[in-house]
Image (spheres, rainbow, N blue to C red):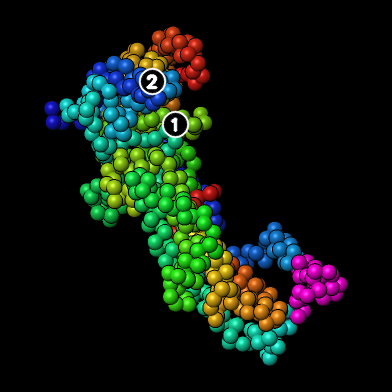
Amino acid sequence: MATSITPRPAPALPPALADLSFGARAWYRLRHQFTNPESLKSLLLGIGGVVLLILAWWLATELLKLPRFEKLPGPVAVWSEFVSRNPPFGTSVFTPEYYMHILWSTLRILVAFGIATVLGVPLGLFMGWNKAWKDYTFPILELLRPIPVLAWVPLAILMWSGREEPIIFLAFLASFFATVLNTLLGVESIDEVYFRAARCLGAKPRHIFFKVVVPGALPFIFTGLQIGMGVAWFSLVAAEMLSGEYGLGYLIWDSYVLSQYSVIVIAMVTLGLVGYLCSAAIRLVGRQLMRWSTRGEA
Amino acid sequence: MSELKGQISIRNVCKVYDPEGVNVCAVDNCSLEIAAGEFCMVVGPSGCGKTTLLNAIAGFHGISTGEIHLDGQLLCSADYTTPPAADRVVVFQNGALFPWYTVLENVTFGPVVQGVMTARQAKRAANDLLGELGLRDIAQSYPGELSSGMKRRVEIARALMNDPKVLLLDEPFRAMDALTKGVVHEFLLQVYDRMKKTIFFITHDLEEAMFLGSKVVIMTTRPCRVKHVIEVDLPRPRDFQTRSSSRYLQLKNQVVKAVHEEAKKAFEAGERELA
């Protein structure tokens, strides 16, 4: 009679891949995109969609000049501004101003998002962890949360004297609520059985907090951070339109006022790209911290 | 008396729930003696209140009247409940391995949080235990990568790592297919033969109870009361062939007869899941 059955784990990744370094894994995934027929097909379809969108944009604005589209900048105009060494409206990949705008917006986001995370995650964890604490703070949170961030603009200007503080405050506010709420949901989503199991195994409250509550809430926390990042950009651009002298939101509004319409599109696309990179960075960190959930879905 | 390890004495325990102003009696005047090192199977229809009894022993909630003792020490009474501790480890119905920890981290969890071992000592001890139980190859896997049978074995290993006096198993093999069940049954029998821990095992599967246990306690349905206690004198070590031995079949017949009446009553009471 067999004394034991040989266990066979089923790894989700190719066996060798799980042990590779981060860079090697990224390279594997990239190569996989181009060599695997299925992935290649999705990639080509994705590129095809974008090409079609640009084509439609070009037809509407520059070739057919459809009503309502005739004043909008077309892709050719935008592209020629964007890659010009001497851009007519002063914004291209060759002008330092372009990078200053990106830098300012990104720095503001980093500060706002950073503060929102540092304050929001612990607050959400405590609210989920301690019933009294939740009873105490939840009504306040639920009263303030539905207020659109733009409604805070006057108070933000009254509260903060400088130029940067109100902008950062508004971006922080939006991000903060998303982070707190999702962290709280994350703690509440943890199955009661894990708390019982931990107590059975002799865990004290601090162990339960750090070894059950925090890792158990992590998937929701990262969802919250993703949403928080999105709404932070949203409020940042709105705030930059109101004040500021650098930043992508400011650039959009300024170009509108000066009738430099191609620059608006450049700034919009740049916002899309930078926002995507920020989300991707959060996803990356999340994946590193939650190998158990990405590897586990075998 | 000091060498007693894991003797449970349940004396006249009642548990009354009061969810909406209506008293619901889950356990009614239940008494049971479990010797140290005994493999005790508690059988009853689902929802009859056996889990209530297990939760009281584990320390998850209190009882309304009566007393439960472990090795002569009071575990709980009407106005006292010993909080959960690692001397009575539960293996849960749907599994409770921490999905965010590897098998090794799960198994070392107990001794590390109790402070009885350093992380390094616990790791070495866990590796030894996993090796002994044939689970060494999966030490670095996450629970999400394992089959249900494997997860249950790891969970039993995690419990054993604390050297508990009592293992409390709450229908741990309930949702498993027959083949997987056969494998984990043999695993548990080997564990028992090696460690001789007191086991308090809840099930609604009568055959499982006969096959594994030394003592089978049959409970009545709501309120939960002890109806029969059957000593199962099948020799150990047991394996899958035990199930076709004549003594097993003879005992089974006897027990089925005894239980039939209760099953009928439960069925009439609207219970669909029966032994």
In this rendering, is residue B5 above or below A114? above
Q: Residue furthest bottom?
A: A86
The picture places residue A89, in percent across and down from the top left corner, at 68, 86
Dot 2 alpha-carbon crowd within 10 angstroms: few under 14, some 14 to 19, many 20 or more? few
Residue positioned 22% across, 23% down in the render: B67
Q: Which residue is mark 2?
A: B22
Answer whether residue B170 is magenta in the image. Answer: no
What amino acid is labelled 1 in the image?
Answer: Phe
Location of residue B228 (image quadrant): top left
In this rendering, is residue A216 above or below A243? above
What amino acid is labelled 2 in the image?
Answer: Val
Q: Nearer the viewer, residue B207 or A158?
A: A158
Secondary element at tag 1: loop
Residue positioned 39% across, 39% down in the render: A193
Residues drawn in magenta: A51-77
Q: Which residue is mark 1?
A: B173
